Image (cartoon, rainbow, N blue to C red):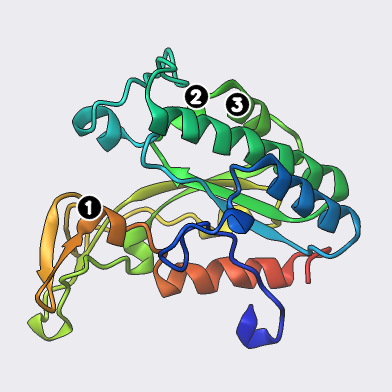
Amino acid sequence: MRRQGFDTRELDAYSSGVFDPALDLSDPDVIDREIADARAGLIDGAHVGLLCSSWCQMAQKFNGCTRTSQNPEGSGLLARELAGNLQLKQAVRLILVFLELGIPLTLENPYDSVVWKIDAMLQLRGDARVTETVFDQCMFKLRPPDFVVKDRIDVSVRKRTRLIGSLSHLCSLKRMCDGNHCHAEAWGTCRVNNKTVSRSRASGAYPPCLCHSLSKLFLQHPSGP
């Protein structure tokens, strides 16, 4: 988008490595600000990536989270789950306004994330203005952090992902693994340039091929930029 000359903003409270409350999408005041900008015609489109650390299956299996398909909001006792619930609540507020105003949007989380079981998400997925797609990120060349091109072994991280939203032609992003490469797990750590790197954290960054494909849809959206 930036290469096409459009102004873009990244709202990530930890993007600089230090917490910035002005970029915290869990803060109702920040959401109110974004809603005001949207109503003023200052926002042409948005992509929402919910922090999946308390929603993903790995969190349930290895990090002691209490969310289940039957009780996706969790026990109400874990701080990280409460933080995730708050972030989702504020994200839904923003998304509903975008839908009202016809602003193209997308929201992403792992395919098997418990977040899709939340009532608010089920309602969004049932909204006539919302479509969804599923894809394996290995088909967009999501690489493990220790991938080395010269090894001549094609290794990717599958990371099956669900994307919902009002963006036109969202289904065109559907890609399921074709089996023509090896898969690396997105958990544990590895050494890269003498530093320990989290595989799951690294897999949270979208591969350039996915970024390009998604931004192209935003540019082509009838009411988009």
Instruction: Please identify the quarter of the rendering in which residue 220 is found.
Output: bottom right
The local secondary structure at tag 2 comes to helix
In the depicted structure, whether residue 52 falls above or below residue 147: above
Q: Is residue 186 left or right of residue 105?
A: left
Q: CA distance from mark 3 to mark 2?
A: 6 Å
Q: Position of residue 182 (x, y in %)?
A: 15, 61
In the depicted structure, whether residue 211 falls above or below residue 123: below
The local secondary structure at tag 1 comes to loop
Looking at numbered disc 1 in the image, what kind of residue is underneath it? Ala
Q: CA distance from mark 1 to mark 2?
A: 23 Å
Along the polypeptide, which appears first: circle 3 or circle 2?
Answer: 2
Q: Position of residue 168 (x, y in %)?
A: 71, 57
The local secondary structure at tag 3 comes to helix
Q: Which residue is mark 2?
A: 117
Q: Rate crowding at label 1 as few (under 14), some (14 to 19) or many (20 or more) other CA atoms within 10 Å.
A: many
Q: Give the numbered dot on residue 186.
A: 1
Q: Give the numbered dot on residue 168.
A: none
For the point 40% across and 29% down, which residue is it?
Answer: 79
Asked if the residues shown at circle 3 and circle 2 are in contact, with their CB atoms under 8 angstroms apart, the answer is yes
Along the polypeptide, which appears first: circle 1 or circle 3?
Answer: 3
Task: Depth check: give the residue in front, 99 or 39.
Answer: 39
Q: Is residue 212 left or right of residue 53?
A: right
Q: Position of residue 158 (x, y in %)?
A: 28, 54
